[in-house]
Image (cartoon, helix red, strand yellow):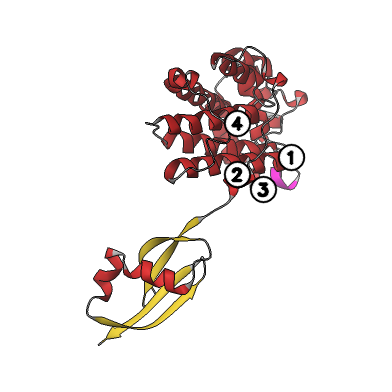
């Protein structure tokens, strides 16, 4: 029987003994230890008896308490064990650095910007999508936090952060939406990474700690989808994507599809024999020679 198979069968790991052996031999090579574990069996579970514990204070001193809190809560469901990795801690640290840098890139504009919910009601285009994304994330977050699903809550916050970073505000209205989104993001992160959130909050010009302000609520109006993109197929092959009002009828969908330049190129000189329309899903134009 192979050593690795023996260890697995008896629920042992090379970390049970090899780590102690390496220490006695004066070998302090983590890469060699991991290579040995990978070849001969699974790494040992973290345990004092196996000399493989991690002192979180070392990570706190190197990366800060917020980073460690973020990493632990993002590593997986709270009811499951996880393997501590330096790469995971560094990933959490990089996210907070991105948050910090992005905030300061826009700080001067954000400090001069104020907004009201009334002003954000009749948005169009990209800013409307940004606001919908923000309030959708907030709604999911509140459900996740009630269920102690911290890892999925953090994943959605990170996704929102990516969306905001791709957004390039140019007008006053853009900065109003960005400020609201950024403040909501800080509130969502606050129970997880309170120190950086309080610091950024104060730099926005607020004089009281965040706990003195009401936690934001999802704006149901912002969550409504008024338009959506659906694929246009010609004889079953995808040829274009068009934007339609939600629940548009077949005639609206057909006329919008036929006005699309890419669609016209494929049906030019041909007869539309049939239209297959699945509301809010797709439109398929069946064409043939005249």
Residue assigned mark 1:
80
**Which class describes the residues within 10 Å of circle 2: few (<14), some (14-19), or many (20+)?**
some
Closest to the camera, between mark 4 and mark 3, is: 4
Q: CA distance from mark 1 to mark 4?
A: 29 Å
**Picture disc at residue 136:** 2
Q: CA distance from mark 3 to mark 1?
A: 25 Å
Residue assigned mark 4:
184
Q: CA distance from mark 3 to mark 2?
A: 48 Å
Q: Is residue 60 visible?
A: yes
Q: Is residue 238 visible?
A: no
Q: Report the number of numbered marks.
A: 4
Q: In the displayed image of the protein, which residue is found farthest to the front? A: 118
Q: Give the position of the C terminus as an image quadrant.
A: bottom left
**Element at badge 3?**
helix
**Which class describes the residues within 10 Å of circle 3: few (<14), some (14-19), or many (20+)?**
few
Closest to the camera, between mark 2 and mark 1, is: 2
**Element at badge 4?**
helix
């Amino acid at each position: 029987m192979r050593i690795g198979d023996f260890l697995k069968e008896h629920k042992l790991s090379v970390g049970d003994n090899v780590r102690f052996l390496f220490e006695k031999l004066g070998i302090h090579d983590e890469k060699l230890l991991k290579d040995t574990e990978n070849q001969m069996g699974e790494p040992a579970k973290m345990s004092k008896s196996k000399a493989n514990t991690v002192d979180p204070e070392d990570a706190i001193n190197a990366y800060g308490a917020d980073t460690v809190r973020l990493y632990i809560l993002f590593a997986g469901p709270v009811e499951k064990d996880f393997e501590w990795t330096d790469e995971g801690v560094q990933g959490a640290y990089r996210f907070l650095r991105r948050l910090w840098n992005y905030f300061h890139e826009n700080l001067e504009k954000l400090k001069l910007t104020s907004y009201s919910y009334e002003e954000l009601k009749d948005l169009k285009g990209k800013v409307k999508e940004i606001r919908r994304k923000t309030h959708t994330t907030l709604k999911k977050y509140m459900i996740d936090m009630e269920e102690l699903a911290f890892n999925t809550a953090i994943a959605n916050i990170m996704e929102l952060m990516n969306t905001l970073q791709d957004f390039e505000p140019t007008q006053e209205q853009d900065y109003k939406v960005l400020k609201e989104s950024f403040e909501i993001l800080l509130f969502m992160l606050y129970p997880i990474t309170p120190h950086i959130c309080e610091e950024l909050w104060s730099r926005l010009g607020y004089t009281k700690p965040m706990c003195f302000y009401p936690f934001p609520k999802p704006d149901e109006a912002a969550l409504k989808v008024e338009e959506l993109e659906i694929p246009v197929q010609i004889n079953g092959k995808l040829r274009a994507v068009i934007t339609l009002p939600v629940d548009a009828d077949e005639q609206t969908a057909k006329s919008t599809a036929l006005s699309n330049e890419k669609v016209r190129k494929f049906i030019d000189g041909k007869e539309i024999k049939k239209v297959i329309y699945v509301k809010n899903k797709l439109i398929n134009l069946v064409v043939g020679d005249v």
